[in-house]
Image (spheres, rainbow, N blue to C red):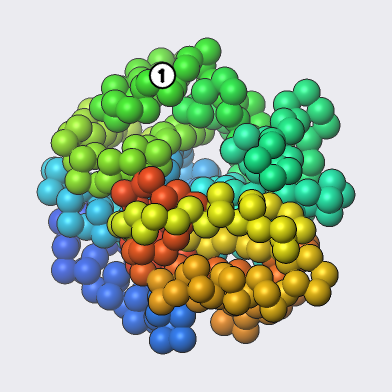
Amino acid sequence: MMNKKIKDIYSKSFKQQVVSVSDKEALNQAFWQIKKDNYSKELLGFVPDKNRSIANISNFITEIASEYDEIIVFAFDALSFEYFYYTMLEDIKNKDLYASVLSSVFPSTSTTAWTSIFTGAQPSAHGVYGTSFYLKEYGKNYNWIFNALADKENFNTLWNQKQPKLNLSKKKTLFQKLEKLGYTNVYLDSHGKENPFLLLGIMEGSKHIPYLNKDFNDLKRKPDKLLKHFLTQTTGLLKTKVKKKMIWNYIDIDDFIHEQGYEELTKYNLWKTLFRYWSDNKSKKRAFLLISDHGQTGQVNCGINILKTSILNGDLAHNPAGAGRTMFFYPKKGKYTSVKKWLEKMVGDSGFVFDKKDLFKYKLLDKNAIAQERIGDLVTLATKSNFPSAGAKYLSEHGSLHSEEIYVPFIIQAS
């Protein structure tokens, strides 16, 4: 049973009750309620909920730190609440697990969402508006995955140069706050040696093991072996004599889901393995958490890659940016109307073509959002599965407002 104090901290952090995973009806009711509260007829999707936001995870973990010596986080990239509810629940036999539904942020993509989770800040406060966006200090778009400045089809990497400041939030990160409380933070990554995109501008002041000297490209194609790797590393870290520690396992299954979908993921039997591990390693001074940043929704290949097609458009001043099903466009002076018409023809009925100010009008971002120049003057927002996404080869994608993209599970084992 979860103690009352942790339940109270949860309720305060997320403005909702956490319920037993065995109470499927209560979980369904919570999901129905958050959708009812946040559906937008104008957007044909769900506006992020700030009260029940993944951004509040940072505060929740900081608050429960006084109750536990060890906090073990399994941070899975791209788990939707719907996948959890309809598939994962069947494999959870632990009676002492509690869960809820949380809201991702906009755009519902990894770089934006993890920055919010680490800092406790909404995108309007940290300025990370996608996987790529315009940086005025360089006069070009920055691509976070490649740590590079984009110039048409060329990417000029910045590995050996001073890193741009991407996270503009002045908030202390979760790792910094826990260190102040006497915790040692260990961060286990799965991006591999050449792609530490989550660390750039976010992980200030934290002790971490970012790569474990391992190439994850092949391992990420085998989710069961990927999970086993992290469980082995966690077991070793739990045996150390460091009394207060947070072990953050960043398990990147995003690409796998993009390419093969949730149904294929289920075949790897991850969840029985994970929750059995939790049960076998239960302790009164140890809390286990499962979190995610966003989900994914199915898409069909409409034959157009909006990113590649846009690079060839001479009316654009910079490469398009954004993330998946939300894209930013930067028309040259005097070319706004022509670019808008061109986008409307390409997007058709698969989504909206917005002016940047519409993001504030529909409360996807706050009107006082920082670094607004990072967002293009024109924005495309997907509503259907045939949106001409930059990831046209994928079976599923994220970045927009579909319920599978926006809502994620939060699971706790804490005595």
Q: Say which residue appears at 78% left-offset and 44% top-offset.
A: 165
Q: Residue furthest bottom?
A: 41
Dividing the image into 4 quarters, which one contains the C terminus?
A: top left
Location of residue 196 with respect to 141 vertically, above or below: above
Q: Is residue 354 left or right of residue 331?
A: left
Quick check: 366 above or below 18? below
Whether residue 249 can be seen here:
yes
Outermost residue toward the top? 213
Residue at horizontal 69%, vertical 35%?
A: 155
Depth check: give the residue in front, 370 or 141: 141
**Along the line of sight, the residue nearer the viewer: 69 or 260:** 260
Residue 321, given in percent of the width and then of the height, sits at: 63, 55
Left or right for 163, reference 217: right
Residue positioned 69% across, 37% down in the render: 154
Q: What residue lies at 52% left-to-right and 23% top-to-bottom?
A: 192
| Residue 313, image quadrant | bottom right
Task: Mark 1: give few (<14), some (14-19) or many (20+) Cα within 10 Å.
Answer: some
Please name the amino acid that badge 1 sits on: Gln
**Residue 105: image location, x then y, percent:** 52, 62
Q: Is residue 2 visible?
A: no
SS type, badge 1: helix
- Please tell me whether residue 394 is drawn above or below residue 194 in the rendered image: below
Residue 92 on image: x %, y %: 17, 44
Is residue 63 or residue 256 the one in the foreground?
Answer: 256
User: Which residue in the structure is indicated by mark 1?
Assistant: 233
Residue 145: x and y in percent read: 59, 38
Q: As rendered, which of 182 and 346 lies closer to the eye? A: 346
| Quadrant position of residue 183 | top right
